[in-house]
């Protein structure tokens, strides 16, 4: 079992060590505002990262999005967790084939429309990969992958440099590739 206090300290140390310009952490009021706009609570570990480490700017490729701010990366430049989520959910509302599940917040963009996202409705905060390239019309289910069963595990992978997204990790045989997300069909439902 991961010691969450220790994990947050290690993430903070790495974030600070990777360069100047790290945004200040957010306060409890901004967490509450974000949760109010989202309509649900952030996963507790995700909230701690924003409260105790920084308002984005760290993590794989230094790309964790800020918590609050403008909407879609594609439309407005660097987006935010709340802005990206609301933009994606709005596009999914009432759609025959919604692309974005309720309660899943994008936390970073890999580029080319790909996102890492945390399922805030999952106790462990599973980390998902949204990869739009498999989309060929109809359901978005083939575009969703389980990257890690927990946010804590995903962070440990990043700290160890062994994630699929690490350039050097491809040299090893034990890199775990994201698997199709078994819950995608159930979670990709339209709520008009």
Image (tube, rainbow, N blue to C red):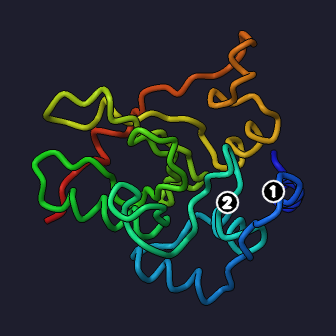
Question: Residue drawn 42% across and 72% down?
Answer: 70
List x then y, in percent, for residue 133: 32, 29
Alpha carbon of mark 1 to alpha carbon of mark 2: how far? Answer: 8 Å
Q: State the image quarter where residue 1 is shown.
A: top right
Residue 15 got which mark? 1
Q: Residue 14 or 4: which is nearer the viewer?
A: 14
Q: Position of residue 44 (x, y in %)?
A: 64, 67
Mark 2 secondary-structure assignment: loop
- Residue visible at 59% across and 80% down? 31
For the C terminus, the image quarter is: bottom left
Residue 103 position (above or below residue 69): above
10 Å crowding of disc 1: few (<14), some (14-19), many (20+):
many
Where does residue 40 sit, x and y in percent of width and height?
44, 73
Residue sitting at x 44%, y 83% = 36
Label 2 crowd bin: few (<14), some (14–19), many (20+), radius 10 Å: some
Locate residue 162 relative to residue 73 in the image: left or right.
Answer: right
Task: Give the residue at x 49% y 78%.
Answer: 35
Q: Which of marks 1 and 2 is nearer the N terminus?
A: 1
The disc placed on residue 89 is none
Mark 2 lies on residue: 57
In this view, 38 is above or below 138 = below
Q: Is mark 1 on a helix, strand or loop?
A: helix
In the image, taking residue 167 as reference, residue 69 lies left or right, namely left
**Badge 1 vs badge 2, beta-carbon distance below 8 Å:** yes
Q: Is residue 73 above or below residue 61?
A: below
> Whole-percent x and y of residue 177?
57, 22
Q: Which of 96 and 136 is in front in this view?
A: 136
Front-most of residues 126 and 170? 170
């Amino acid at each position: 079992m991961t010691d969450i206090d220790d994990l947050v300290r290690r993430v903070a140390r790495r974030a600070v060590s990777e360069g100047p310009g790290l945004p200040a952490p957010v306060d409890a009021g901004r967490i509450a505002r974000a949760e109010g706009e989202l309509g649900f609570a952030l996963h507790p570990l995700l909230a701690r990262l924003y409260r105790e480490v920084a308002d984005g700017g760290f993590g794989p490729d230094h790309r964790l999005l800020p918590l609050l701010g403008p909407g879609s990366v594609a439309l407005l430049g660097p987006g935010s967790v709340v802005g990206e989520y609301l933009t994606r959910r709005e596009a999914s509302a009432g759609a025959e084939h919604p692309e974005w599940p309720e309660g899943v917040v994008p936390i970073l963009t890999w580029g080319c429309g790909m996102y890492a996202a945390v399922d805030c409705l999952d106790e462990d905060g599973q980390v998902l990969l949204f990869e739009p390239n498999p989309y060929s019309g109809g359901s978005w289910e083939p575009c969703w992958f389980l990257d890690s069963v927990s946010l804590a595990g995903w962070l440990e992978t990043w700290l160890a440099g062994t994630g699929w997204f690490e350039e050097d990790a491809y040299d090893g045989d034990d890199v775990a590739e994201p698997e199709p997300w078994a819950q995608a069909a159930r979670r990709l439902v339209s709520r008009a």
